C-alpha cells in the first residue's frame, strides 16, 4: 500500500498441542527456518525465533497488509503440514489452538531478542506456563486459568 507507514513489532508464542515436547533438536533449526520463511512470504520481517520442545517464540516486524489472525493461521497450518510431511515424528504433529501475541516498541526490541535467544537458559528456572502467565500479566491481558496451557500429565 502506497503511503502506508508503520512500525509494528509482535512477539507470538505458539505451543505444541497438549504441550507435548515434540520439537526435537535434530530438526528444530529446520522448523525455525520454515517458520521464518512462511512469515517472510507474507511480507513481514522476522527479528528473532527460538523455543523449547513444547513451544516457539517469534518476534517480527508486521506489515499492516494482513491480519495477525490470518498470518498465524497460515503459519501454524503450513508448518504442521510441513512437519508431518517430513516424517519428523511417529505420530501426527499439531499446534495448540490459539497463540499469544504481544506488541513492543522499538526501544525494547534488543531485550526481547535476547530473551527469545536465551530460551533454554530461561526455562531452567521457569516453566512455560509460568512464563506465559507472566507475559499475560505484564501486558494486562485478562485470562481464565482454565484456558491457560497446563503442564503435561
Image (tube, rainbow, N blue to C red):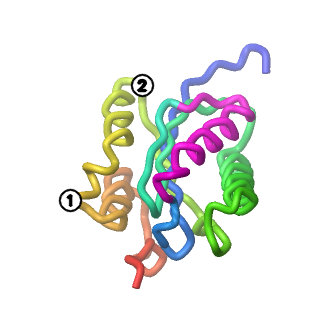
Image quarter hosting the C terminus: bottom left
**Residue 125 got which mark?**
1
The residue most toward the top is 3
Q: Crowding near pointer 1: few (<14 within 10 Å), some, many (20+)? A: few
Query: In this rendering, would 6 be left or right of 105?
Result: right
Q: Where is residue 60? Give x, y as percent.
A: 54, 34
Helix, strand, or loop for circle 1?
loop
Q: Where is residue 47? Give x, y as percent.
A: 50, 30
* Numbered-mark total: 2
Residue in the image at 35% along x and 24% along y: 107
The residue most toward the right is 1
Mark nearer the N terminus (1 vs 2): 2
Compute the Cα span from label 1 to label 2.
Answer: 28 Å
* Vertical position of residue 1 compared to residue 128: above or below: above
Image quarter hosting the N terminus: top right
Query: In this rendering, would 132 be left or right of 76?
Result: left
Residue in the image at 23% along x and 58% along y: 124
Pair 1/2: label in front: 1
Residue in the image at 43% along x and 69% along y: 143
Q: Where is residue 12? Give x, y as percent.
A: 52, 48
Q: Crowding near pointer 2: few (<14 within 10 Å), some, many (20+)? A: few
**Residue 33 got which mark?**
none
Please check the rendered image and state whether residue 83 is part of the magenta-colored stretch, yes or no.
no
Residues drawn in magenta: 24-46
Helix, strand, or loop for circle 2?
helix
Which sits in the foreground, 134 or 30?
Answer: 30
Which residue position is annotated with label 2?
Answer: 106
Amino acid at each position: 500500500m502506497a503511503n502506508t507507514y508503520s512500525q509494528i513489532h509482535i512477539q507470538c508464542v505458539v505451543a505444541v498441542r497438549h504441550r507435548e515436547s515434540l520439537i526435537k533438536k535434530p530438526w528444530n533449526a529446520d522448523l525455525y527456518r520454515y517458520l521464518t520463511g512462511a512469515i517472510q512470504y507474507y511480507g513481514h520481517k522476522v527479528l528473532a525465533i527460538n523455543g523449547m520442545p513444547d513451544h516457539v517464540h517469534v518476534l517480527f516486524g508486521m506489515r499492516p497488509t494482513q491480519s495477525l489472525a490470518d498470518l498465524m493461521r497460515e503459519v501454524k497450518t503450513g508448518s504442521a503440514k510441513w512437519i508431518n510431511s517430513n516424517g519428523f515424528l511417529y505420530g501426527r504433529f499439531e499446534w495448540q489452538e490459539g497463540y499469544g501475541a504481544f506488541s513492543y516498541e522499538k526501544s525494547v526490541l534488543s531485550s526481547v531478542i535476547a530473551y527469545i535467544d536465551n530460551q533454554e537458559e530461561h526455562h531452567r528456572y521457569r516453566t512455560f506456563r509460568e512464563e506465559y502467565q507472566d507475559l499475560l500479566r505484564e501486558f494486562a491481558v485478562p485470562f481464565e486459568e482454565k484456558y491457560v496451557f497446563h503442564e503435561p500429565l
